[in-house]
Image (cartoon, helix red, strand yellow):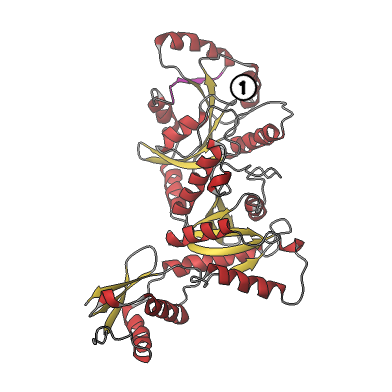
Amino acid sequence: MSFTIAIAGRPNVGKSTLFNRLLEQRKAIVDDMSGVTRDRQYGVADWNGKTFNVIDTGGFVHGSEDIFEKEIAKQVLVAIEEANVIIFMVDAITGITSLDDSMARMLRKSTKPVFLTVNKVDTNERLLEASEFYSLGFEHVFFIASASGSGTGELLDAVAALITDDASEEVKEMEALPKFAIIGQPNTGKSSLLNALIGTERTIVSEIAGTTRDTIHTHYNLFQKEFILIDTAGIRRKAKVHEDLEFYSVIRAIKAMDEADICLLMLDAEKGIAAQDLNIFSLAVKKGKGIVVLVNKWDLVSKETNTAVNYENELKKRFAPFSDVPILFVSAKEKLRIFKAVEIALDVYENRKQRIPTSKLNEVMLKAVESYHPPVVRGHPIKIKFVTQLPTQVPSFAFFCNFPDDIKLPYKNYLENQLRKHFNLSGIPIRIFFRKK
């Protein structure tokens, strides 16, 4: 069984700063505005050779009327259920608040180990003042400053002591699973898709655009299929990015693309495809990711005989020149074709990983070159002698010839079409290079 720790506490005690420090990267958005972390976020940390999952939860607010705060409280409870150890964070500067008290009451009922972690203890005076937190009645108390990292080593030693080697191995295996990022503009239904697939309220879904600010990783393991789903904050055009947070979220969504193997691009069926969707698409192509296009809210579109076919053709026209992309009409709300989407994404993942034997490549592609020669340049015929697939993550092919610099785009496109025709490369951007033989 893999091992998970959850960081919980009221807003603004420094949970995300600790989360980032444990992961040694800036994964959670850190800002002085309370309520920035709305969903629970996952990451993987290493300490003393032990690997474990870390969950960063939204700030716990008890009995609040705010719609997000109510949802956050639900998320915190789920995270606590999922975790093996709970790091309960409090703030030495403000001392014990009524929110800390109500959370302590809740955590004392838990059977799991709770590490009370007093943050912002960066001077001796603060260390003295922080001793009041012993009154909360927890056995394990740690004094840290998560911004500088002081004291986090002792906390991690205590966590690592509870982790078995098997649990640590399992976390590493998860890292090797296929990763699918759900990308697209705000309010296209990305979080609804995630919740429909997993069947639990993993992210907060609401009608307010921009609810998901961080990228969120979820392990999917159902119906003999296993992969990691990354839900990203909606990407908007720059002109619309008002708040700093929005800006961070866009960067985060772009980084999620970097982490992913396959991008599930969600479009809103009623709104059709906008320039911003094309930007997102071409960004995924540039990054060499596998792509599956999901046209969501299809249940809301009034249909005639060829509606889907015409819609698909229109999309492919807009995606050109890379139009060899699976397009699926889905409804996350009605769970229409969403499991088909998973199957197609896994197929595209296999396509991206495949290695085509050199002998097979040459047999097929040299025939294609024979039937349509590259144009003659300055009186010299261009001769392509040999083809091989390069050992890269994005399927890339090197064609060896006598004048590599003289092959123009139309011929390159011809070769790409031939590769797609003979080998299964649907949904995969491919790279073609010409080299001197």
Residue plotted at (43% across, 21% down): 144
Picture coordinates of residue 338 (x, y %)?
Answer: 65, 62
Whether 163 is drawn above or below 254: the answer is above
The residue segment tinted magenta is 138-146
Name which residue lies at 71% across and 31% down.
66
The single residue placed furthest to the bottom in the displayed view is: 371
Image position, residue 311 (x, y; %): 66, 70
Return the x and y of residue 362 as percentages of the image width and height: 32, 83
Q: Is residue 240 left or right of residue 406?
A: right
Residue 135 on the magenta segment? no
Q: Is residue 342 visible?
A: no
Q: Secondary structure at mark 1?
A: helix
* Residue under pointer 1: 104
Quarter of the picture containing the C terminus is bottom left
When the figure is inspected, residue 99 is found, relative to residue 253, above or below; the finding is above
Residue at left 57%, top 71%? Answer: 316
To which quarter of the image does residue 25 belong? top left
Task: Determine the residue positioned at 78% across, 67% down.
Answer: 302
Q: 30 or 282, which lies in front?
A: 282
Give the camera-side residue of 23 and 117.
23
Does the magenta segment cover residue 145?
A: yes
Relative horizontal placement of residue 302, taking residue 349 as reference (left or right): right
Mark 1: which amino acid? Ala
